[in-house]
Image (cartoon, rainbow, N blue to C red):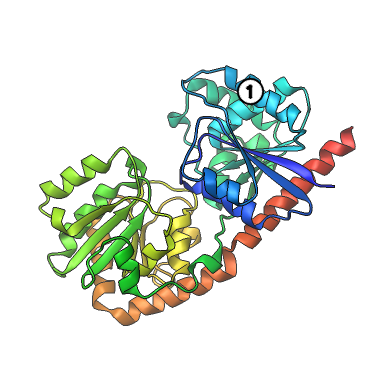
Amino acid sequence: MRHRVLHVIYSLYRGGAERIIEAQLLGGDRRRFEYLVCSLTGGGDLIDRMSNAGARVFLLGKRRRGDVTVVTKLANLIRREHIDLLHVHNSAGMFWGTLARIASGTGVPIVRTEHLPYFPEELPSLYRWLYPRFTKRTSKVICVSEHVRQSFTKQFPALAGTFVEIPNGIRLQDYEELPPRAECRAQFKLLAGAKLIGTVGRMVPQKNHKLLIEALFRVRQTVPEVHLAIIGEGEMRDNLAAYAADLGVSEYVSLVKETQKMAYFYGAIDIFCLSSDFEGMPLTLLEALASGVPVVSTEVGGIPEVIESGKTGYLVPKGSAEFLAKRIVELLQDPSKAAELALNGRAMVHERFSAEKMIKATEAVYDEALAKTNSKR
């Protein structure tokens, strides 16, 4: 007997949470689980990829804050598709998914994944009030790093047993044999002969790409042939372009739109950098390491659980363009150290952060939730 699992997420644009779902669709145990995906809002660039991976995708069309019709639509979907388990993602999934499960009257178990640390100041007051109450209705809350888990257990100590850590994982085979660097750079129209720093991520305040642009300005004082490529979409694109112009480095900064051949980007760059102010467990970090690229990152969220500074990459203080630039220069001027970090980082990711490990642990959580529910019936 196969159990029907419905993933509920706010949208299906390319982000870490959405890509974790995609990895599970591609690698899950189809003998025991059938996966369906529901976007609370509309479409996104991962719809076709999820459909091609064998999942049916449902779009609920939520268009405004407080659109309570979503509850009825989702409750009807749970009943109509005979869902056995609801897997909701982040605060929006928690709120609307739990309300829909209650409205459906089915009593199906809920598993939730939190992809970022708990930031109460970022949540509406109603969400903050509902968090402990809805968590009591949840079988398990998967946290993508120990840092994320601790941020929740510190806030809700009475519910600590509900929160479990399952680190993010990636499909390692996607990053094993990348084309030659020249071909990878041609894919993104990047300069063939430059030293290239790169990052992948939505152009939003959390990622603090301004810090990386400032670091580039500093690096160029020592290594003038270096360029920066940022791949992604988001509200900060024009702001970042203006900031690069203000610093006089526009011609050395490429703001690249996303492409289906994302893995090629890692094959195009010399150093991967993360300048984020906060993170859970960024997939892009794991992907860069798996691709054999040396990494410099701010020391935030679950990143220190991946990077041992000086062994598998370099960590720098959050918000410090000076330290970020210093480490970049060190790696550009010391190719042997860069190669050592890259080799160690790749081996570590293969050992600890495969999609297979993540999926196996997640499906074990499903088994526990389903068994507990069935024992009560």
Taking the image as drawn, is residue 172 in sight? Answer: yes
Q: Position of residue 88 (x, y in %)?
A: 62, 37
Q: Is residue 371 left or right of residue 212?
A: right
User: Residue furthest toward the bottom?
Assistant: 336
- Quadrant where the C terminus sits is top right
Q: Is residue 316 visible?
A: no
Secondary structure of residue under mark 1:
helix
Disc 1 crowd rating (10 Å Cα; few below 14, some 14-19, many 20+) is some
Locate residue 72, reporting x and y percent. 65, 19
Q: Residue at the spot x=65%, y=32% of the render? A: 135
Q: Nearer the viewer, residue 260 or 310?
A: 260
Q: Residue at coordinates 70% horizontally, 57% vertically from top-left?
A: 360
> Total label count?
1
Q: Indicate the quadrant where residue 182 lies.
A: bottom left
Where residue 126 sits in the image (x, y, percent)? 53, 20
Residue visible at 20% across and 53% down in the picture: 214
Residue at 25% from the left image edge and 63% from the top image edge: 190
Image height of 62 relative to 110, above or below: above
Q: Is residue 127 left or right of residue 292?
A: right
Name the residue nearer the viewer: 21 or 191: 191
Q: Tell me which corner region of the image, top left, top right, bottom left or bottom right, holds residue 230.
A: bottom left
71 left or right of 327 in image: right
Q: Is residue 371 left or right of residue 140?
A: right
Circle 1 is placed at which residue position?
A: 73
